[in-house]
Amino acid sequence: MDLDLLKDTLAELGEPAYRAGQVWEWTARGAGGYADMTNLPAGLRAQLEERVPFSTLELVDQAESRDGTVKALFHTADGRPVEAVLMRYQDGRRSICVSSQCGCPLTCTFCATGTMAFGRNLTTSEILDQALFFRRIEPIDHCVFMGMGEPMMNIENVLAACEKLPDVGVTNRRTTISTVGWIPGMKQFLAQDRPIRLALSLHAADPELRSRIMPVNDRYPLPDVLELCVKHWRETNRKVFIEYVMLAGVNDHTKHAQQLAAALTPHEAFKVNLIPYNPTGTGYEGSGRTTIGAFRDALQRAGVPATVRLTRGRDIAAACGQLVADRETTSAA
Ligand code: SAH
């Protein structure tokens, strides 16, 4: 729901200011539409129905994985594709993965989203509407900004969405923003004091290798990015999650683990999450389980805490890096 349009419309209709709060409260709790909002006058509900679309996003396709993961493809009002994912875990956690941009201007060579044309930043309402869509299916309690796009390039809208997410059930402590290391946005993120988690897509500690797979490294070199991460940890005492996608024969050798351990100083500021690579047709292959296990062990021997990420929703192309809304693969399921 376009919250600015809602406010303007209510003002035009001469409604008291508290109406916007009432509408938001219903919406954030998963109401299916204006008709559910029984404490609003019927005439007003009808007006809103006509003048303020209940969502800024139109659902175009929805797929459910064997593991319960749900992927939704939406179109914005100007026809741009946006994808978001709901992950259901056995311990009851319900985590959503949302997009911050339509497409992505960065060109990480292993990521499917990077191959689609960049559209634009999503508005605060478009980000929230992804969460609200899933909230209407069931209660949600975690959110990661790991869908399409680079959240730190759209940090104002991302933070504005984070301000409202607790109403939808997701506290800031259970919210994670992931970045390639886009320094201007990271600085804005560090300047605010919400207890949101920070995750860094690192993928290679060696400068030459990192630049090869993540060209953004030429613009914002890893040491500068890590310096900001350590600053964040010192100021907040919150560890920074390091994402490391395991690419067979590219960045998965023991020497790469050693380079990574050396780059992550002090070790206590970080926690590494190794990501099994999800095939996307970009020419890379994922490292095998044994290699990933050995890499994790090497990190742990070096004193760096590391875990392996559980892969969800691969059968519906909803896994990390598989969101690419302008290809047939997305709507196949
Ligand atoms: N632009 C931000 C937010 C996207 S997060 C960032 O890169 O951090 C998406 C995560 O999935 C990133 O860590 C990305 O590197 C990783 N990823 C991309 N393609 C992948 C793939 N095919 N398999 C597994 N992880 C992938």
Image (cartoon, rainbow, N blue to C red):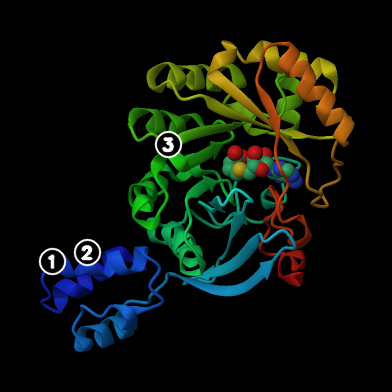
Residue pointed to by mark 1 = 17
Residue 265's x, y, as percent?
Answer: 59, 11
* CB contact under 8 Å: marks 1 and 2: yes
* CB contact under 8 Å: marks 1 and 3: no
Asked whether, in this view, residue 108 is left or right of residue 12, the answer is right
Measured Cα–Cα span from mark 1 to mark 2: 8 Å
Residue pointed to by mark 2 = 21
In the image, residue 332 above or below residue 186: below
Q: Quadrant of the N terminus?
A: bottom left
Q: Identify which amino acid the numbered label 3 is placed on.
A: Ile
Which element is circle 1 on?
loop
Mark 2, Cα crowd under 10 Å, few <14 / some 14-19 / many 20+, is: few
Name the residue at 67% across, 61% down.
68
Residue pointed to by mark 3 = 196
Which residue is more in the foreground, 133 or 5? 133
* Quadrant in which residue 332 is drawn: bottom right
Measured Cα–Cα span from mark 1 to mark 3: 30 Å
